[in-house]
Image: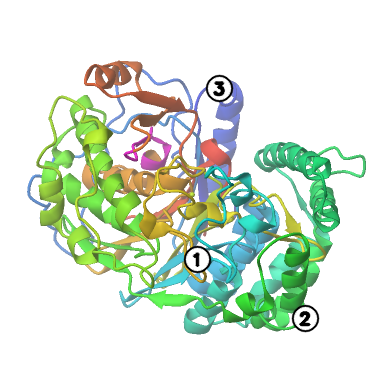
Amino acid sequence: MVGAMRSFSVSPTARSVGSLRRLFALAAALALACGAKAQPADPTPAASSPPAASAPVAQPSAPAPAEPAGKTAPEPAAKPLLAVDVATGRHGAVTSAEKNATAVARAILERGGNAVDAAVALGLALGVTHPTAANMGGGGFMVVRKPDGSSAMLDFREVAPSKASRDMYLDDKGNVTMDRLRGPRAAGISGNIAGFAMAHKKFGTLPWKDLVEPAIGLARNGWEIDNTHAGDIAEALNEMRSYLEEVEAAAKPNPALVAGLRETMALFSHPDGTPLKAGDRMTAPALATTLAAIARDANAFYRGPLAKKMAAEVTAMGGLWTAQDLASYRAIERKPIVFDYRGYQIITVPPPSAGGVTVRQIFAASETLKLYEKPWDSVDRIHLYVEALRRIYADRNNLIADPAFVDVPMKTLLDVSYMARRMSDVDLKTATPSSKVGAGVTMQEKPQTTHFSVVDAKGMAVSLTYTLNGSFGARLAIPGTGVLLNNQMDDFTSKVGAANAYGLVQGPQNSIAPGKRMVSSMSPTIVAKDGALRAVCGSPGGGTIPTTTAQILMQVLDYGRTIDQAVANTRIHHQWLPDAIIHEETLDPAIAQALAARGHKLISRRAIGHANCIEVDPTTGDLRAVADAGRRGGDADAY
């Protein structure tokens, strides 16, 4: 990229070392041509000796600030375990799950739009090119930090339709049914367009239509499918075919649902029914028409002919949407959770997302247990971290819900002294069975979410996470619109004691009710220090979202690692139930064995999350954008 230094850090198993060296040589040559010095990570297999430590240094305009008490010296960062795409610049940075959408955001920044303008255009573009998780049929949360240091949070989470009821996903025997996950009954009322429109009205500078037009162009003219999305499409089509076969085999098949499924499958396949593959050019003409209506008036999604058509089509297929549900939907501006952690200010989301509370409690546990004093990859630190998560997720799953329906004990949950009490029974050497851990207060999301981060030249930052919930949502588009239905209703508690699609076992406080917002794990987060922006971070991944976000930020803030080193490193998760450490397959076998010896059960995954993050170098002010490419693709850009 002209004007940006880009580097790649890739696992040696991902591509041949020779081809990687050629890639890095090309990246270095491009960077040098732009006047920047490229410093890509070594792509060769990790040697036995670690690389030199990278220590944070002081702001050039002020004396070095004193490190918080107990701070250890930055420890050497392990060589990258998974690929990351890195771009650096001084005027703007963006990172997202798909390169065409990232390019849209950069173009908006370059023409003078601010970070919110770029985020809105990016969110709409991802709705075209990243159908796995984006599309306008979902909902999410946005955290904004303005150049003056003030912050805001927008909640555009989906809500339950007015016809929804507590036991709507239980059969005659009390078993949870599959229509919470697929088909028209799985969909909550979408909030994405309302959220984007609110953000633009409050913080944007460019005309609304100028932010929608790039998405319209992509939908009309097409874009090239990459390998990651080709794999997603093939998998989704198989699931859609299986669902269609079940619908057609029913005693009385719903013809509107059959037609809707066939139309949805046609969006992602060739005329012969084979899935679109990497390198194919995909277009979305129906979605372009829908976006054109929204460009003229953002309210068109919720009121008028388009809204009435969507409600009628969903109803015909057997869903619960009504035109009044759409007309009644509102995005909400809420006060963000803001707390201090060892000299840093952390800004994140409040309920109905449980993610921000979880992030805050993880940092409080770090202070209580002094996790930062132990080596990052030590068995002692990981054991204590997991024991903290076990207790934190017991709270998350049993206490947090839509604050309009439930009195969430926020003052207690955010108090460091409360977390100290919660950690008082942690055994330093032995795992506590989750069956012995409950919520600490008595009260009277598959990983196909997506996250992106944007920073502009003036220091405005946006951290935004939004989703359809599962991959391709409910596996069903609203006929004639290109709008994919979410399957967000599964994030409610369909049955107390039954796990949702992410394995989260939640309490009655999150039961289904008309107009209620389902609890979420989304955790878009922004970090500042001494009044200056330091980092923008978040991830998809259902219940793993807060732990991914916290692990990345703790490595940056407590261990002196750069954001790309932190994103590339191995991730570990625990969520109370199931009672197991979920870890990436890159975890050192010796560490895994030592954790098992302390009584932990371990489950391995290839990857956890997909964190697209940005940091500001505390010395130079340079922006470093990182896409978590080795886990789920993506693209970072800066200039």
Q: Residue furthest right?
A: 272
Identify which residue is drawn at 51% across, 23% down: 12
Mark 1 element type: loop
Q: Does residue 571 show up magenta in the picture?
A: yes
- Amino acid under label 3? Val
Kindly tell me whether residue 192 is visible in this rendering. Answer: yes
Mark 2 element type: helix
- Amino acid under label 1? Arg
C-alpha distance separating marks 3 and 1: 44 Å
The local crowd at label 3, few if under 14, some if 14 to 19, many if 20 or more residues have their Cα within 10 Å, is some
Task: Check the image and report above or below for 303 versus 425.
Answer: below
Residue beneath label 3, please?
17
Asked if disc 3 and disc 1 are in contact, CB closer than 8 Å, the reply is: no
Q: Which region of the structure is painted magenta?
A: 566-576
Q: Is residue 28 left or right of residue 511?
A: right
Residue beneath label 2, please?
305
Residue beneath label 1, please?
157
The mark lying in front, picked from 3 and 1, is 1
- Amino acid under label 2? Pro
